[in-house]
Image (spheres, rainbow, N blue to C red):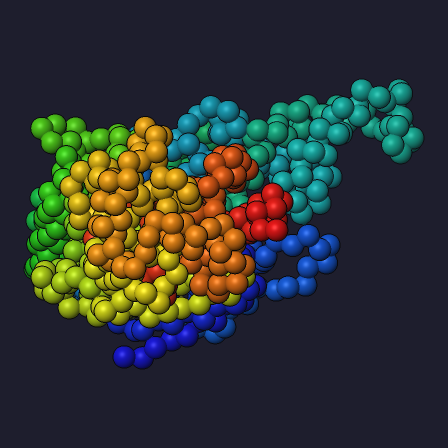
Amino acid sequence: MAETMIEISNCNNIAEAKISITENTLNIKYGCNGTGKSTISEAIRLKSEGNSLEGLRPFTDEENNDINPVVNDIPFTKVKVFNEDYIKKYLFKSEGIFADSYSVLLQSKECEELAKKISDLLNELQSSFNEEDSISDLSNMLSEYMSVVNYASGSIAKRGGLGEFLKGNGAGFEKHQELDAYKPFYESDIASVSKWADWRTSGINHMNGDSCPFCTSNMDMPVIQKQNETIKKVFKKSAIKTATQVLEYLKKGIEKGYISKDAEKGLLEYLGDEDKADELYAELSQLAAETEYLQKKLRAISIFRPMNVTHDQLTEIEKSLKSMQIDRNILQKYYTTDLMGNSVDAINAKIEELLSKSGQLKGLFFQHESKLKKLIDDRKDDINAFFTLAGFPYKFEIKEDGERKANTYLIPFGKEKAVSEPDSHLSWGERNAFALVMFIFDAISENADLIVLDDPIAAFDNNKKFAVVRRMFDNQQEVTFRDKTVLMLTHDLQPVIDYIHGSFFKAYGLTTPVRADFISNENGVIKEQAIEDIDLLNTVVLTEHFAKDEDKPLFVRIVNYRKYYELTTSGFKESACYDILSNLIHGRSIPEDGQKQPMPQNLIDQGMLEISKYMPGYTYEKMIEELKSSNLIKEVSENSNMYYRILAIRLLFEREKTLLQQLKKEYPGACKFLNETNHIENDYVFQLNPEKYFAIPEVYVNEIRDFIDKHGVIA
């Protein structure tokens, strides 16, 4: 299988890294916390998306940091990363579970093909509306008139500006001879009439006798007064605004070819004539009725989708289609142009064509509905089976909600009501295990070519680990990571044990190839070491081997023998052998018992006899001499093996309890790591050979080194 090498440099605590990924394989990268695993996943994601790596720039104390983060070109175009950020961004939104449940859970090739066939049948009708500029433009324009006349329940409003307009105000100025002098103003720009009329009316109050303050000449006052009376009446702001909007609408409709010029003439005859208010009202109402009729028809066509209606409604699809047909007899006066006639005929022809195919349309919809229902049932069964396996006390529910929408819920066992705010009700393990299963569907729905799992299962209990991993690579499921390119970054050795050494995948018929590497960070350089089956050793066998190996330093043999003794001896703490081992580790020249009293010689002999089975030829005194502090200090200073050095430091600190206490105070994390190295309770049944695969977080190495220098442990 092809292998990709991803090169990363100058990203957070990584100065240089070469990460190998085998295609169509589960690639496990096992390393301790602080190695840079999350940096690796984030660097890969950012690079694949073409985003800046600036956020990964290493921190330095230098003012001018010219070290730029770099990731080489990678072949992956769609990388999906599972981590805490993913959970926060996509899951447990409001009362639902996933931000886009439909596309993640219900998108399938079969359903998409059926939906496309349905859409293709409808496209001809909707393209008549969408692609015909005149029709789509008309649809946008119709609402303008409806808002002007406030048409509702078959009638227009007679109040406000429209009421004044019906009284003959706001238009028809040419019918007032006294206003002939103002014809250039109201004919050129009717919208500005109210402004200059208001200016003129208020200016009358500032006349001085027969003199105008603007022209300072004598004026014919009888004429002026008659003009004033007419202007105050017919030039009202509200009336002019309404008149302007109505006339502009007519003008626009005529220019675009929607409205008949002859129809406009009839309406214009009634403007400015208070005695023709009823006739004007009838004309405006006729225009409103035709406009509303067209508006309803075109809106129904534009939103028509069978997926938007219920099963029962779809059985009456012929009725729905017929209700969209446009009757030209209703458009008696205004929308009677050739353009409108041709457009209406085209729409009606498309509807007739669809009516002839309504049986086919219903058949496609029912197929789609059936496939979608089966898909919903399959998804529910799949996820609920996972819940059962993982021990979740919930039932998963998904419901379709219109076209390409769905809602997801969690329902507690024995309850009918869904959990509100599921994020606050689920335990940490439940939340993350469920999130990881949802991530499977998300990654597959987006056709990710690299799937990154950033420490996905380290904190799960065994039930959840088993359930999650089996579901991730399940051969029996359609949506699975089987044979996908997956990168799992983890500080948990258990997946390596289960999938490399153990027969987990084989036992459950999981065919995805698995490889594992041990990664360590040494002064910013990430090193990969392949982990094979033979590298995973039974802890009992490994510690026994170390105890018997005469080529290893005595302190390494002693520490491993004590661990072996703990693993294989019942009641080990009560034995003389265990007391002797503890005394050797603490460097006591005179061995003590559990009560801090000198051990009797017979117990010393008894303990040494047991030890001699694994380390023959030694007396207690000879061992103490070889384990003296000066020899341990030499190991710390000169031995290149990090495992040996850490064990030597630990023994040194065991002899100086004040040092251990001070280390705990100054560097608690480093102290905890040092204390727990080779502790029985921290190990699995199998482990990696610590001589070859031993890593300590770099921050702890630096802290221990600083502590040793500061306190003069090594003179």
Describe residue 387's horizontal placement relative to residue 178 as left or right.
left
Q: Residue at x 63, y 34 (%)?
A: 176
Classify 628 as above or below 360.
above
Q: Along the line of sight, which residue is nearer the eye, 218 or 138?
A: 138
Tell me: 384 left or right of 659: left
Q: Nearer the viewer, residue 96 or 62?
A: 62
Q: Is residue 349 above or below residue 625?
A: below
Q: What residue lies at 26% left-to-right and 49% top-to-bottom?
A: 608
Image location (x, y in percent) of residue 202: 76, 24
In-image side of 74 versus 600 (left or right): right
Q: Is residue 638 visible?
A: yes
Percent across and percent down for residue 345 are 27, 61
The residue furthest bottom is 2
Task: Name the one closer to the observer, 215 or 152.
Answer: 152
Q: Where residue 317 appears, x then y in whole percent?
A: 13, 51
Residue 624: x and y in percent read 40, 49
Quarter of the image where the N terminus is located: bottom left
Regarding residue 286, the answer to whether it shows in the image is no
Give the residue at x 28% y 42%.
Answer: 604
